[in-house]
Amino acid sequence: MPKRFNNKIVLITGGSSGIGHATALAFAQEVAKVVVADVVDNRDKETVKTIKDKSREVAFIKTDISKPTDVENMVKTTVETYGRIDILFNNAGIAGFPVRLAELSVKDWDRVIDINLKGVFLGSKYTIPVMLEQGKGVIINNASSSGITPIPRVSVYAAAKAGVIQLTKAMAIEYGGDNIRVNCICPGFIETPMTSIIIPPDSESRDYSHLWPLTKPGNPEDIAKAALYLASDDSSFVTGTSLVVDGGWLAGTRLPLPRGS
Ligand SMILES: NC(=O)c1ccc[n+]([C@@H]2O[C@H](COP(=O)([O-])OP(=O)(O)OC[C@H]3O[C@@H](n4cnc5c(N)ncnc54)[C@H](O)[C@@H]3O)[C@@H](O)[C@H]2O)c1
């Protein structure tokens, strides 16, 4: 097992669940020191406990990513504890509200934008000065395939994630000369607590065979592997990109022709 992240300091927002949880474990497996920041701290015990049980170093900072004072504290505490931030994974997010645009309340619009888009801005805003001081750093944002091609009833989620993709490019061109790489991941449908709310795992409508070429849902580890690639020196010439990890969903619509025709 390669140890690409030996003693690297990795800050992961939304690390208590789903993709953030799997990514925290994957970094810990490669001997990174992981800081989990999440608004929820009860589920975090699972992430932190699992990492501690493997005798790896981990810390937790309760953080609402939409609140500037919380995010400032998240960065300050990480630097006080470990002295630096090598990798920031802006991962925290919420699913949004499954209604058509006119039925979406202004409050719900603001909530999704505040967490899914402003949260990425805040995480980056307070971390970048630390990375500038260090002379290097890597930022990975968790966007979505919906930020490229929306599905129905996700208008604000899609708009926020499209914003994350553009923010990624803007940060990449602004800070490339400072040795800070910024990329995003666009997951397709990944089985996590977030998607379980939308389609329960035992639901009959959970037949993916017609939806995307690889005919199965992704799992959080699929996204963790993409995050580790973008965080590692394997991607040292990669910045400003959106890595789509979606089982081929965005490759195109498949005509329902009979097999063999
Ligand atoms: N699961 C998918 O199919 C999928 C697809 C595309 C993109 N994504 C994105 O991946 C990211 C992780 O999603 P997931 O599927 O693992 O969901 P999840 O619900 O399992 O995990 C999200 C985590 O973010 C935390 N969080 C929510 N609001 C927060 C806030 N204000 N401050 C700090 N933490 C907060 C939650 O407590 C939770 O631990 C999200 O940004 C999501 O939009 C997920």
Image (cartoon, grey):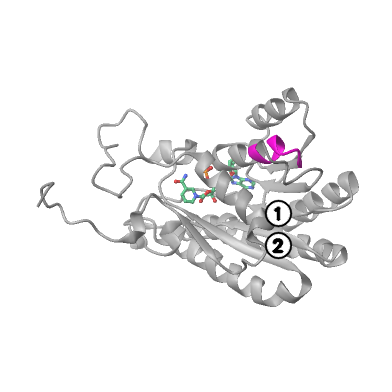
Residue ranking furthest to the front: 1
- Secondary element at image label 2: helix
Q: Which residue is mark 1?
A: 88
Quarter for ligand 1? top right
Total numbered labels: 2
Pointer 2 residue: 124
**Mark 1–mark 2 contact, CB under 8 Å?**
yes
The quarter of the displayed image where residue 248 is located: bottom left
Q: Residue at x 52, y 48 (%)?
A: 94
> Which residues fall within the magenta stretch?
26-33
Dividing the image into 4 quarters, which one contains the N terminus?
top right
Q: Amino acid at mark 1?
A: Leu
* Residue 76 as seen in the image, left or right of residue 114: right
Secondary structure of the residue carrying numbered label 1: strand
Look at the picture and state if 237 lies above or below 68: below
Q: Residue at x 33, y 58 (%)?
A: 100
Label 1 CB less than 8 angstroms from ligand 1 = no
Nearest to viewer (mark 1 / mark 2): 1
Figure check: 55 above or below 76? above
Q: In this image, 157 relative to 29: left or right?
A: left
Q: Is residue 66 visible?
A: no
Q: Cβ of disc 2 within 8 Å of ligand 1?
A: no
Question: x%, y% of residue 225?
Answer: 57, 45
Disc 2 residue type (three-letter) = Ser
How far is disc 1 from disc 2 in space, using C-alphas?
Answer: 8 Å
